Amino acid sequence: MGERLDNCRIIDLPKVKDPRGNLTFIESDRHIPFAIERVYYLYDVPGGSERGGHAHKELHQLIIAMSGSFDVVLDDGRDRKRMHLSRSYYGLYVCPMIWRELDNFSSGSVCMVLASNLYDEADYYRDYDAFLAARR
């Protein structure tokens, strides 16, 4: 049936404070529960647009608001919750078999995603009904 929504959580990332500017770092299998194989980021998202709208069969992700803010709606086929991301030292861990939608992007926002695997179209559920059927 897959993971439950309760497995998704905010991870408080290390923050090194310095009057010259703060620094946050992320180490595979230490700060996050997977090894990082791919990094990508979303930017210049037009107002009112949505991203995501899919689930992954095997992929683990950490979603971070590097700049600005946005919301992530998580859905395990039974429950839904909306998470607001607005700090670069918090990451939202999303486990496999969770439907996700990103919306409410502020102007100039940048969303960075750390992923456990390289891109693989076969790992996606892009149809919500197919996702629900797989959850059953």
Image (cartoon, rainbow, N blue to C red):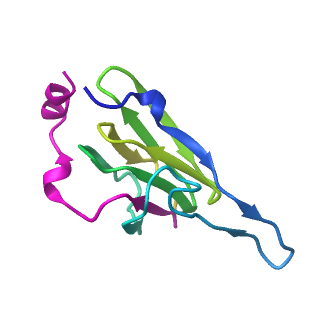
User: Splitting the image into 4 quarters, where does residue 35 fall?
Assistant: bottom left
Would residue 58 appear left or right of 114 to someone viewing this image? left
Estimate the x, y position of residue 76 in percent, counting from the top left. Answer: 33, 28
Determine the residue located farthest toward the bottom in the rendered image: 20
Identify whether 80 is placed above or below 114.
Answer: above
Q: Quadrant of the image for the C terminus?
A: top left
Estimate the x, y position of residue 127 in percent, counting from the top left. Answer: 15, 39
Q: How many marks?
A: 0
Q: Quadrant of the image for the N terminus?
A: top left
Estimate the x, y position of residue 40 in percent, counting from the top left. Answer: 38, 68
Residue shown at 33%/20% (left/top)?
78
Determine the residue located farthest toward the right in the rendered image: 19
Residue shown at 31%/50% (left/top)?
59
User: Splitting the image into 4 quarters, where does residue 14 fall?
Assistant: bottom right
Q: Which residues are magenta?
A: 108-136
Identify whether 60 is placed above or below 36.
Answer: above
Would residue 75 appear left or right of 19 to someone viewing this image? left
Residue shown at 29%/25% (left/top)?
77
Residue in the foreground of this view, choosing between 76 and 116: 116
Asked whether 66 falls inside the magenta stretch, the response is no
Estimate the x, y position of residue 93 in percent, counting from the top left. Answer: 48, 46
Identify whether 110 is placed above or below 4.
Answer: below
User: Splitting the image into 4 quarters, where does residue 15 fall?
Assistant: bottom right
Determine the residue located farthest toward the front in the rendered image: 29
Asked whether 124 falls inside the magenta stretch, the response is yes
Residue shown at 51%/47% (left/top)?
92
